[in-house]
Each structure stands twice: as C-alpha cells, then as structure tokens.
Amino acid sequence: MTDSKLATTAPADTKPRRNIFSGRTLSDGKKLYWWREILIVIVVDVVYESVRNLSAGKPDKAYENALLIIDWQRNFGIWHEQAMQNFALDYTPLIVFANYFYGSVYIAATLFTLIFLYSKFPDDYSLFRNTLAIGTLCGLIGFALFPLMPPRLLDDTILLQGANTGHWFGFVDTLVKYPTFWSFNDETMKTISNQFAAMPSLHCGWAFWGLIALLPRVKSRWAKTLVVLYPVVTVYVVVITGNHYVLDAVAGFFLFTVAYLIARKVTRAGRGTPIATSSNPIEPAVSNNTAPA
C-alpha cells in the first residue's frame, strides 16, 4: 500500500548552482572569465620579466644617462634626492618601512585593484586591465633605449670600474643596509634582475594607475585618502631607498596617462551599448514633452 502523501516534488524556488567557470556577463553582453584573466596577467608578467632582463644595458651607458638625468634635475631645480635620503636615514623605522613598502605594496595594491574592479565594476575592468598591460609593456621600451643607473649604484666602483672618477654622491643602498624582503645585492637577484631598468619608474606608474582606477569608485573618505596617498608615498619611497630619481616617477605617471588614452581607444568589452537582460531590463526612454501612455 502506498501513501500518496509521501510523494515529494522539488521545491519551486530551488536555484540552479552557479558554474564558477561561467564568467561574468557585462552590460553590453560580453563576458569576462576569471581564469582567463589570471592567464593574461601571468603571460604579461612573464613577457615583462623576460624582456626586461634581456634588455639590460651596460654600466657605462647607464651611468652616463644617470649623470644626464641629474643635470636635467639640477636645471629644473628638483635635484633633492640626496637631501631626501639623508633626512630619512636619521629615522631607521622609516627606512625599514620604505624597504618593505617598495618590495611588496605594488604587488598587493595592483592585485587588489584588479580583483576589486572585476568584482564591483566589471564593465570598467577591461579598460584598466588593458591600461596596465599597455603601460607595463611599453615601459620595456624605456628600459631598452635609456638604461639608467639608479642612485644607489652611483658609487659602486666595482661595477663602474673607475668610470665615476671625480664623482661621489654618497647614496646608501637601503635594501642592502637595512632589513627587507630581498636585496639586489643578492646573487640570485643580480642574475634575474635588470638593475638599470629605472626609467620610467613602473612602481610609480602602477601607483598612478591604481589612483585613476580606484579614486572615482571608492566611496568612503578614508578609502579615497589612502588611494591618493598611494602614489605620493610610492614616489617618496622609491627616492629615499635610492632606487629612482624624481624624473623616473614623472615618466611613470606620463607613461600610464598615455596607456590609459590608448586603452580607451582599443578596449571594447564593457564599453558597448548596454543590452536588455532579464536581470537588467532597459526601459524605453520617454520624451519630456510627451506624457507616457
């Protein structure tokens, strides 16, 4: 004997499980896939690291370019790198903070910005992903055409083999002298890193990219303050650690401004005409001069 009351049916409001590989649909109907975006970031990073290290210039040329940058900054009245570092060296916690900031924050801030845009502003994600890729890869042109010795290496007599006769700047390589995650003085870092990739400063370029991506999209005052301070602190950090000149930072800002303008021209995803969906219906516009039916 069967009891018809025991028969069960699936609840009407049961929602299908969301496929984590299904991606996000943008307002114009195009789709973003998080796994594809991760692959893009990895490919860009591999290309950047490989080409940057292959394009390392010779020390004598990098030193010659450094003297040129210093002359330009003196003429502009902005040659303050030595004074800025000397002041910071009197405060060890400040230098240690700068070392750790230099070695880590640009990675964390860049990844956070990409994830934030993908999650909260997917229509804007592709524009800023492309800006980041264009700016980063175009920076390689500067490294190849204008190898530049950073301030921390200006007094390295072994590296220069006497090329700096008559010049002594007194910069300290804080990554060697003070605690940090890593140092360019490490043999492994010497092998895999182009130490003359200073112009433009991509640390500053990435920070400027984070500023233009986040400032219009964060709401709270404290968040906006942090976003504005990020590039400002980055410029200060790269200078007092002896890794960049002020003009390197200016070039980084300019590079990513150009990259953004290029990205606006070439980016299509998320920038097309919005289409109607079940979750985002588009109502027909009503003229102000005609009463709705």
Image: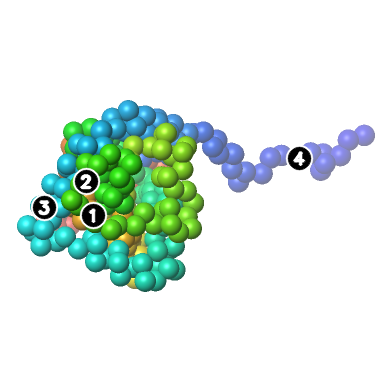
Inter-mark Cα distance, 3 to 1? 15 Å
The residue lying toward the viewer, choosing from 97 and 218, is: 97
Is tag 3's residue or tag 1's residue first in the polypeptide sequence? 3
Inter-mark Cα distance, 2 to 1? 7 Å
According to the picture, the residue beneath numbered tag 2 turns out to be: 164
| Farthest-out residue, left | 75
Examine the rendering and report whether any part of residue 163 can be seen.
yes
**Residue placed at 7% from the left, 57% from the top?**
75
Q: Which mark is residue 74?
A: none
Give the residue type at disc 4: Thr
The answer to whether mark 3 and mark 2 are in CB contact below 8 A is no
The answer to whether mark 2 and mark 1 are in CB contact below 8 A is yes
Q: Which mark is residue 8?
A: 4
Give the residue type at disc 2: Asn
Residue count near mark 2 (Cα–Cα under 10 Å), binned few <14, some 14–19, many ≥20: some
The residue lying toward the viewer, choosing from 122 and 203, is: 203
Give the residue type at disc 1: Trp
**Residue placed at 25% from the left, 33% from the top?**
58
According to the picture, the residue beneath numbered tag 1 turns out to be: 168
In x, y percent, where is residue 140?
Answer: 26, 35
**Residue placed at 22% from the left, 50% from the top?**
248
Q: Does dot 2 land on a helix, a strand or a loop? A: loop
Q: Which mark is residue 71?
A: 3
Is tag 4's residue or tag 2's residue first in the polypeptide sequence? 4
Q: Nearer the viewer, mark 4 or mark 3?
A: 3
